Image (spheres, coloured by chain):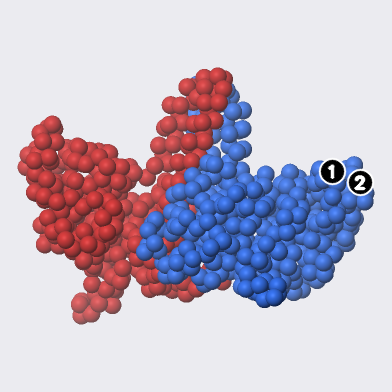
Chain colours: A red, B blue
Amino acid sequence: MIKVAVDAMGGDNAPEEIVAGAVMAANTRKDIKILLVGQEERVSAELKKHTYNTDQIEIVNATEVIETEEPPVNAIRKKKDSSIVVGMNMVRRDEADAFVSAGSSGAILVGGQVIVGRIKGVERPPLAPLIPTEKGVSLLIDCGANVDARPSHLVQFAKMGSIYMENVVGIRNPRVAIVNIGAEEEKGNALVKETYPLLRECGDINFTGSIEAREIPHGEADVIVAEAFTGNVILKLYEGVGATLIAKVKAGMMTSLRSKIGALLVKPALKETLKSFDASQYGGAPLLGLNGLVVKTHGNSKRTEVCNSIIQCVTFKEQRINEKMKESLFPKEKEQEER
Amino acid sequence: MIKVAVDAMGGDNAPEEIVAGAVMAANTRKDIKILLVGQEERVSAELKKHTYNTDQIEIVNATEVIETEEPPVNAIRKKKDSSIVVGMNMVRRDEADAFVSAGSSGAILVGGQVIVGRIKGVERPPLAPLIPTEKGVSLLIDCGANVDARPSHLVQFAKMGSIYMENVVGIRNPRVAIVNIGAEEEKGNALVKETYPLLRECGDINFTGSIEAREIPHGEADVIVAEAFTGNVILKLYEGVGATLIAKVKAGMMTSLRSKIGALLVKPALKETLKSFDASQYGGAPLLGLNGLVVKTHGNSKRTEVCNSIIQCVTFKEQRINEKMKESLFPKEKEQEER
């Protein structure tokens, strides 16, 4: 039985969609136990609307709620009875294998580090969302809040990301590339120039070199390594350009009677194709390198995305991702243990 | 009479489209003199296909061509008789006011610095393309090759960009913002945190604070200040996501008979709307802060973009942009001169 704590109070659609997503996950997989963390009365009222195996879902009371706009460090320190702090403490104490939240990104990043804690030797836990491409999805690692990374951090990101893509998403021998402003090794800023040869020397990843931002949507790499500032810009611009273009396409279809009729005919097929350009079916963004798993789902997540994020935690645990990461990151220590 | 040297050999469609664009510009504005730099026989053969005022277009022979894949520093040093080196030397010697090229970005950036030369006191010449937004265009400054910028560079970019947008593109009191991973002043990497207060203190620009990448396509700022690595990622991802989404939309319309019929009806209106999401009508990307003007147009530029880039040089000269930049960047020196 894999235990997943779920933040019932986080995100725009809490608790309704979160609870519905938890029920959906419990009804999909019989080997999950879900701990819904949040204000008991409200969560209970939502839960009563659904049919599920009562052995699989339990409510854990947490009276406080961390709001998106609260300064994260302060919120984690002061709101000891918030759903995020309570849920993360369960992971820390091994009462849960993973924690899923659609709440404040900042609080999740801070809480992951200070409550759940890093795997010994992991310098920084990266936030690694999946982004849609023409061919499927790529893992963009890191999009967190730890900017100004060092080369050694990026090497750890590459290894962790590679293991995640291979074992959770199921891409064999994933291609790992570093975001750069040209394809040649001598191109780039100081960080990229220092990191490039280190990645080339990693025997256990399939490093394919630099990737220019233009090639990312074409799916030219499976694991896209970037410093968090760059990763964050890529992630948000992806969303922004996508939203603007879709709005332009819709507006274009409404400009004449002829195009309006065309729009009616085109709509169903178009909707289906654009759905393939949506990464949420794969779940949320994992915060990797922690003693346990923390998954951040979109603030506007609906039940399906919440359900997928919970099931993603099961795969993570089943595939022993953290153990595999430790083996990849610290092979010498393992050898020493074996002697 | 404003003199514009044009690289007749640069870009995917040279010399045909370049020559056609030069003729188009000469036929649009009677106050331009165009110096077509390139292999005389080939340029002359193209020019013969057109009707134009022969006083306005002249061929300047340059026997060599710099290819896109050549290492730029080497190419500029060795190919003394290339169209880029010859054209830039004309600007340096004041035989031309500006130089327009669709050729190698690297060679144009290097040549701009070492041949044309920087305005005294300008630390780095930024490459500043216009990118399309929902509301029009924004200037993205810097997208060049000078990565790892310092705060003082970014302050100069903000001032130069502001003057360009106000006087060349015609945006009154342009909103200047710095690319960041959050809206608050305390967010960001070391460079942004150091630059932010310096920009806030600039009296002569309309600094509106941070801009997240998600807001760029919405047109939330007119001048978008970024270090070149970040700027380059934004520019290329913009193109990449745009191309992928348009391809998805087209593919979606071809999936069924119903949608194919719809596509035929929708197509003209859609084409028109998407055309508004194309910045090439405003010309190419200026390389600012030089003793003269250098404009880089897309490698795949057709005649209209070449023509617009040439006319952009006229506005630049007429509006005395370089003089205005000097006044904004070095106000004290000006005061001293006046005493």
Q: Are marks 2 and 1 in contact (CB under 8 Å)?
A: yes
Give the quarter of the image for residue B41.
bottom right
Image quarter of the C terminus of chain A = bottom left
Label 1: which secondary element: helix
The residue indicated by pointer 1 is B27
Residue A45 screen position, x and y as percent: 10, 36
Can residue B98 be seen from the camera position used here? yes
**Which amino acid, by three-letter code, is at mark 1?**
Asn
Q: Residue under mark 1: which chain is it in?
A: B
**Which label belongs to residue B173?**
none
Relative to A309, does residue A247 appear above or below in the rendering?
Answer: above
- The quarter of the picture where residue A184 lies is bottom right
Which residue occupies 48% across, 53% down? A216
Q: Secondary structure at mark 2?
A: loop
Q: Residue at x 58, y 37 (%)?
A: B274
Q: Which residue is mark 2?
A: B53
Front residue of A215/B86: it is B86
- Mark 2: amino acid: Asn
Measured Cα–Cα span from mark 2 to mark 1: 8 Å
Disc on the earlier residue, 2 or 1? 1
- Residue visible at 74% across and 74% down in the picture: B77
Pick the residue in front: A142 or B120. Answer: B120
Q: Does label 1 lie on the same chain as label 2?
A: yes
How crowded is the residue under tag 2: few (<14 C-alpha within 10 Å), some, or many (20+)? few
Q: Residues within 10 Å of mark 1 (few under 14, many from 20)?
A: some
Residue A158 can be seen, yes or no: no
Residue A20 lies left or right of residue A93; in this view the side is right
Left or right of residue B142: residue A316? left
